[in-house]
Amino acid sequence: MSNKYCQALAELRNKSAHELKEVGDQWRTPDNIYWGINAMFGPFVLDLFSDDENAKCEDYYTAEDNALAHDWADRLAELNGAAFGNPPYSRASQHEGQYITGMRYIMRHTSAMRDKGGRYVFLIKAATSAVWWPDDAAEMAFFRGRLGVELPAW
């Protein structure tokens, strides 16, 4: 897939050094946070928003794959487990009429996939008044305070 989002991501990854403000959507979930969530809600078999170097599961979708263009429920039925997502928070953008980012569209797709089957666990900020907030989630768990994230491993 060649779109502006993926092109900007490729340029960022190819830089020898990064300023923190440039990392944007690419912050990495720390392993201890991931494994704690996995112990509570997993086992996770599909990372919905990742890349080759930072995926938490053996099976994953990259920005180039565009997770929002895939049927997660069918994939989870094949893999026999749950999906984990630490989604990108960038503004909504499209490629050829298909959304690739935007929390409203990510949560909309998640709801449709949940209705088809499968378990989806997201690490999201507690923005309970946001238009995309998943009021219909089966379960919610909150961390006290702010979580630290890590620079991506590129």
Image: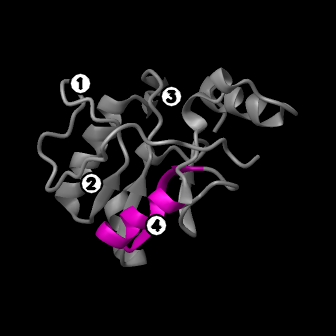
Between circles 3 and 1, the one closer to the viewer is 1
Check disc 1 and give the amino acid type: Ala
Q: Earlier in the sequence, mark 4 or mark 2?
A: 4
Between circles 1 and 4, the one closer to the viewer is 4
> According to the image, label 1 marks what residue?
130
- Give the structural element (helix, strand or loop) at label 3: loop
Q: Is 101 left, or right, of 136 in this rendering?
A: right
Q: Please say whether residue 46 is one of the residues in the magenta stretch.
A: yes
**Residue 135 lies in quadrant:** top left
Kindly indicate whether the residue at mark 1 contacts the one at mark 3 (C-beta within 8 angstroms).
Answer: no
> According to the image, label 2 marks what residue?
113
**Residue 76 lies in quadrant:** bottom left
Q: Earlier in the sequence, mark 3 or mark 4?
A: 4
Q: Residue 38: horizontal and vertical position, in percent?
A: 39, 68
> According to the image, label 3 marks what residue?
96
> According to the image, label 4 marks what residue?
35
Give the Cα distance between marks 3 and 4. Answer: 36 Å
Check disc 3 and give the amino acid type: Glu
Q: Nearer the viewer, residue 35 or 24?
A: 35
Q: Residue 36: horizontal and vertical position, in percent?
A: 40, 65
Q: Nearer the viewer, residue 134 or 37?
A: 37
